[in-house]
Image (tube, rainbow, N blue to C red):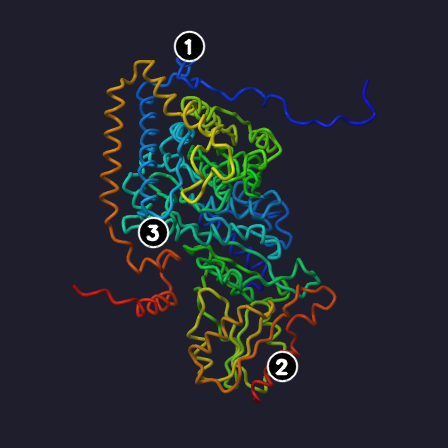
Amino acid sequence: MSTAVPTPVARPSGLDQAPYQLIAPDGRCDAARIDACAVPAAQLLALYRGMLRIRLMDERLLTMQRQGRISFYGEARGQEAAVVGTAAALGPEDYIVPALREAGAALYRGLPLAAYIAQIFGNDHDLTRGRQMPCHPGSRAARYVTMSSCIGTQLPHATGMAMAAQQLRDGHVIAGYMGDGATSEGDFHVALNFAGVFRAPVVFVCQNNQWAISTPVSQQTATPTMAEKALAYGLPAVRCDGNDVLACYVAMRALVARARRGEGPQFLEALTYRVSAHSSSDDPSRYRDESVTAVWREARCPLVRFRAFLLGRGLLSPEGDSALREELDAEVRAVITAEESVAPPPLRSLIEDVFALVPPHLVEQLAEVAAALPQKPAH
Amino acid sequence: MPVYNIIQAVNDALRLEMRKNPRVVVLGEDVGRFGGVFRATTGLQEEFGKDRVMDTPLAEAGIIGTAIGMALYGLRPVAEIQFADFIFPAFDQIVNELAKFRYRSGGEYPAPMVIRTPYGGGIRGGHYHSQSPEALFAHTAGLKVIIPSNPYDAKGLLLTALRDEDPVMFLEPKRVYRAARGEVPEGEYTIPFGQAKIVREGQGLTVLCYGAMLHVVMEALEKQGAAEFDPEVIDLRSLVPLDTETILESVRKTGRVVIVHEAQKTCGFGAELSALIAEKALLHLEAPIVRVCGLDTPFPYTLEMEYLPSPERITKAIADTARF
């Protein structure tokens, strides 16, 4: 018997199950499920190496920020699995349209560490000519688009790039990254809506790290998941354990394959936690319970988990792990040493790249600046 | 030679370039099946298909944002914003993303594309179908700002825009979309950016204007007797890059300047022109620089013709300046 008044639908079913996970926080797993994923050992080790590399790099660079050697730093600590796992599932010619914490993805797919560190220093080796704060790398060769500091603005670009790839029929997929905070921005909704309407080959990856500076996800949105927002725009969505690198990799691999097959845009919500501060300018102890953070930082650490998994599977030995740490740490130290002394970009770079050709009025403006520069002591 | 209005000239330029360059795509609200609310994209979807002429959802930030993505990827998008008044949801995309992409990426990710949008009043459009936001874009480093006043220039400048390596804001004066008619050569031709056009040579004073206001200035000359002061009338055509040479050469000759634009006065583009002349040609001036502009109010409905620079106001400004 139908009722006289309609019963509102609260939310779609199917979103209440636990996020997709392959490896438990202590490293244990169901071997049959792992084998069914058919991820080669070399790929597993590459994931570990990629995560460890950014952990060591972040630690070193945050220390340098504290020492006053660089102005700013934003770590990806605790989110290495979501960054590396998803990026590793892309093809070499697919593009990444990143948010703040995906630099590890650029490094994973070949951005030289020296280029990343040069951007941190904003020196003359920086591909982007010292024009942005640290943690804003970009490279055409690495197919990693140069981000702005604005939240969510990159998402319509990811959709548009995917629409172009679709039109050129080149078979490439675009990955558009965001944090949970970005889902409140209009650009998020615009990007997903256009992607849905045009069936663009884009995979959106939301690293839900549960904090946007001091704003918890519960104050960001009334929906329990980010994934259900995607459903509203006609995008199939998966939620995965963002601290399980293998789950991130396998989930992303499936979504990328769907997009590449012409099945339209896809959405991945990687559930993780921002265990560090938002950036070097932030102090989370003022606004959250750091005992919760400690659980994520230690017991749920993605590196601890994956290391235990690799040790358990016999793919890594404690000695091999130590050697890898030493190798990566030495690389980071050597690159920092080499880049820290590189000069800033030349004055002329101030007026280059505003337009394809430098216009006369900028030459005139720069001449005025140059004429009033303090003379360098001659010695 | 065919006689076209501005809409037909725009349509012709788009069609020619789309035939020549398969990477040129058009997107916007109602631009495909319907051919645009002003009909500027009529017939393009029929000829080039839905892949290249895309009817989009109703979201300006999405139109511009996805067009930026296409440009980053190597397409040459032409995004239409139905009225310049509605461009502001995309303002962040234009100012923070489009204008800065080449600079912030060190040239790794340039985003050459064209944003076409009808602007200006005089069509009974009220607040939201009448505004002239050109100064906001001229104030944003990294954008070129082009405003044609007639069909010949519209076609030649749009073809230049479609081949330019930088983002171009192409503002079309909708008040004279159909009224401004003229001979337009068939086939391709381009007009370089940064070249103002001296529409009428004169010795008495310099009148600087662009877009629909050129026609109001000419009406002042032809019907209100302003021609007796022998003005030199310059159609800027391009605000960025600006043809400072032509402007300053004229000012040095006449020593008197009237600037006409329909955008509001304060911080309008006339303020920049005025400052430029003061910086570079002060000692040539025989009279104060005068601006005839829209008022510093929101754009009105009933009294729009009182708000807009009229032939009478322009004639008075010309006469006062000439006699100063």
Work out whether mark 3 precedes mark 1 in sequence or the reverse, and give the earlier one: 1
Q: Callout 1: helix, strand or loop?
A: helix
Residue A196 or residue B284, whichever sits in front = B284
In the picture as drawn, the residue positioned furthest to the bottom comes out as B323
Q: Which residue is mark 1?
A: A32
Residue A42 higher or lower than A221, as above or below: above
Image quadrant assignment for residue A170:
top left
Which residue is located at x 33 percent, y 45 percent? A120
- Establish if A371 lies above or below B145: below
The amino acid type, in three-letter code, at marker 3 is Gly
Residue A364 image-quadrant placement: bottom left
Cα separation, mark 3 vs mark 1, equals: 49 Å
Q: Is there CB contact under 8 Å for labels 2 and 1?
A: no
Where residue B3 appears, x then y in whole percent? 58, 64
Give the x, y percent position of residue A90.
Answer: 40, 30
User: From this viewpoint, is residue A12 visible?
Assistant: yes
Share a chain, discs 3 and 1? yes
Q: Which quadrant of the rendered structure holds the C terminus of chain B?
A: bottom right
Q: Tell me the residue that label 2 is attached to.
A: B315
Disc 2 versus disc 3: distance between alpha carbons? 52 Å
Q: Chain of mark 1?
A: A
Residue A130 numbered mark, or none: 3
Q: Is residue A257 visible?
A: no
Look at discs 3 and 1 and give the one toward the viewer. Answer: 3
Label of residue B310 in the image: none
Chain on which label 2 sits: B
Q: Inspect the image, locate mark 1, and give the three-letter code of the amino acid beneath it.
A: Ala
Q: Are marks 3 and 1 in contact (CB under 8 Å)?
A: no
Q: Position of residue A172 (x, y in %)?
A: 42, 33
